[in-house]
Amino acid sequence: MERNLYAPPEAAVADVEPVFEVPDDVLKKIRQAWMAGACSTVITLAVTLLAIAGTSIAGFDAWNMVDVLLVGGLTWGIYRKSRFAAVAMLAYFVISKALMFAEGGKPAGVVWALIFFYLYVQGIRGTFQYHKLAKKQ
């Protein structure tokens, strides 16, 4: 066989994502954490846009767009299975809830806060388990 001089060059391309079996419960923990982050991002965005439009809601203003971007970025990180993003999301969530409590003086939405706390903790567990499995492979 003769080599075609006009054929495009070919190179072996390695897969970017490692190919290994990840248990469904690990992926479920990560999925639930990023979905909780997505819900938080959407709700914060909606309330911020209402505040910008002139409705006064819980002290929100245009500066809360920084919060939207931060939570959205951390959510994307959790979706990409980042351990740092999962830990940072939980830390940011706890700090923001503590500041809201200190500012408001009464615990509002404690049940929802506990649910989100649980989901973010599970996200941390899931991302660490995922990377532990990836390292074994």
Image (cartoon, rainbow, N blue to C red):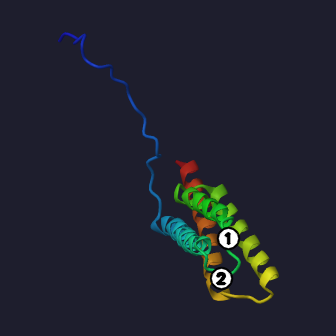
Disc 2 crowd, CA 10 A, few/some/many (<14, 14-19, 20+): few
* Numbered-mark total: 2
How far separated are the C-alphas under marks 1 and 2?
Answer: 25 Å
Q: Position of residue 92 (x, y in %)?
A: 71, 66
Q: Tag 2: residue type?
A: Leu
Among the 4 quarters of the image, the one containing residue 9 = top left
Q: Position of residue 102 (x, y in %)?
A: 82, 81
Q: Position of residue 130 (x, y in %)?
A: 55, 58
Identify which residue is drawn at 53% across, 70% down: 42
Q: Nearer the viewer, residue 16 or 40?
A: 40
- Is there CB contact under 8 Å for labels 1 and 2? no
Among the 4 quarters of the image, the one containing residue 7 = top left
Secondary element at tag 1: loop
Q: Tag 1: residue type?
A: Asp
Q: Position of residue 132 (x, y in %)?
A: 60, 55
Q: Nearer the viewer, residue 129 or 65?
A: 65
Identify which residue is drawn at 66% across, 67% down: 64
Among the 4 quarters of the image, the one containing residue 4 = top left
Left or right of 112: which side holds 101?
Answer: right
In the rendered image, the vertical position of residue 10 relative to residue 46, given as above or below: above
Q: Earlier in the sequence, mark 1 or mark 2?
A: 1
Residue placed furthest toward the front: 54
Residue marked by disc 2: 114
Secondary element at tag 2: helix
Residue marked by disc 1: 61
Left or right of 39: which side holds 111?
Answer: right
